[in-house]
Amino acid sequence: MAVPDRRGGGASSLPNIKSFAIQIITSPWFIFFGSLLTSSAAGASHVFSLYSGDIKNSLGYDQSTLNLLSFFKDLNTGVLTGLIAEVTPLWFVLFLGVVLNFFGYFMIWLAVTKRIARPAVWQMCLYVFIGSNSQTFPDTVSLVTNVKNFPQSRCVILGILKGYLGLSAAIITQLYQAIYGDDSKGLILLIGWLPAAISLVFIRTIRIMKVTPHSNELKVFYKFLYISLGLAAFLMIIIIVENKVTFTQGEYCGSAIMVLILLFLPIAAVVAEELNVWKAKQAIFEYPSLVKVITEEPTQEAVSSLNEPTLSSSAIEAKVGDQTDVSCWKTAFKPPNRGEDYTILQ
């Protein structure tokens, strides 16, 4: 039995800022924060209607050709992204999304601004297809990483990340109006470099870590949820006001700054949670003699419990060996047991 020994102790020292900063950026909570920012810029395909008119006018397309481009924009190959994530590291999947995103939208921007020769329709369809499907790479990486880092809160994680993905179109629109004003061609360039830049910043941060239990894990996720609801409410209000009132460039900048503040506000929840962990670690280092071991004679109940028969390792192995492996083809149309991963065929 162990009881605390209050006689030992040490003088409190100032926290090591560098160690605390390293603890923050290597924590699973910071990974989730990076995933939120990545998801908030991963919905660029939803703003196609804002710049489709520029494509139509600059390249001389009719409405049927524009509808064809819209079809390739909605043609999704997310399954391919999942297959790539199964056989390659997650940082490579994220980097591949960066390359495809920048290439697809940058080529569209070059064509619309007439910096290159007028591409054929099939080439524009290819550019739109590559650009829109590049969004599935950061989305897949964010979901896979955080579901495995927080397996007990996977439902909450899916809801929050998908919520930020749904808000991404409104977020990008606010930033575009503040940076480029009424130049909708600049929006194409923005969705080419902004999602790629965010993914590059967190390319080594977003990774799968060893699962560690958190006593107040759900409460922390509720903080992220409340912040996301606040962001959604602000976007809804500001969009309604912008449709009623003509904003100046400075007012667009003000709304964009507020959006950025709400986007980075979850870092406060990350710091607060890691500060609690830091204080717990510091208490252990400051009081090395905090625990004193007391030996006592075992009770009769403890002795009797030790003498109870238990399964031997050979018996356990025999029991496990009785469970024959089932072919993956037979389970292709059956959902896995709760807590287990889906197979490729499933």
Image (cartoon, rainbow, N blue to C red):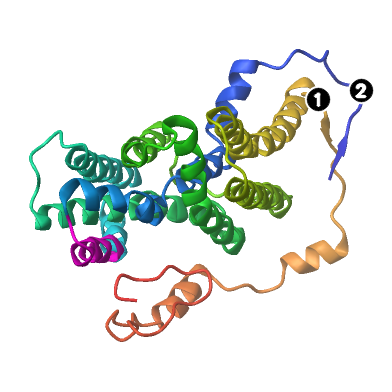
Residue at which label 2 appears: 7
Residue 194 in the image: state x and y as whole percent: 39, 36
Image quadrant where one finds the C terminus: bottom left
Q: Nearer the viewer, residue 113 or 265?
A: 113
Decide if residue 38 is in sight here: yes
Magenta residue check for 292: no
Look at mark 1 in the image and give the residue it sits on: 289
Residue 53, placed above or below residue 38 = below
Relative depth, front residue between 291 and 230: 230
Q: Is 18 on the left or on the right of 138, as rendered? A: right
Q: Position of residue 81 (x, y in %)?
A: 29, 58
Q: Which residue shows up at 69% across the image and 48% down it?
A: 230
Q: In the figure, is residue 177 to the left or right of 344?
A: right
Q: Which mark is residue 236?
A: none
Residue contact between numbered discs 2 and 1, judged by CB atoms under 8 Å: yes
Magenta span of residues: 61-76
Which residue corresponds to the image point at 29% horizontal and 56% vertical from the top-left?
A: 133
Q: Secondary structure at mark 2?
A: loop
Give the position of the N terminus as an image quadrant.
Answer: top right
Q: Relative to 140, does residue 196 appear above or below in the rendering?
A: above
Give 165 or 259, whichever is nearer the viewer.
Answer: 259
Residue 70 image position (x, y, % from top left): 27, 62
Mark 2 burial class by Cα count in 10 Å: few <14, some 14-19, many 20+: few
- Decide: few, some or many residues near mark 1? Use Cα within 10 Å; few <14, some 14-19, many ≥20: some
Alpha-carbon span between mark 2 and mark 1: 8 Å
Q: Residue furthest right?
A: 7
Q: Is residue 140 left or right of residue 178?
A: left
Looking at the picture, which amino acid does disc 1 mark?
Answer: Ser
Three-letter amino acid code at the position of disc 2? Arg
Question: Magenta stretch mostly in which secondary structure?
Answer: helix
Marked residue nearer the N-terminal end (2 or 1) = 2
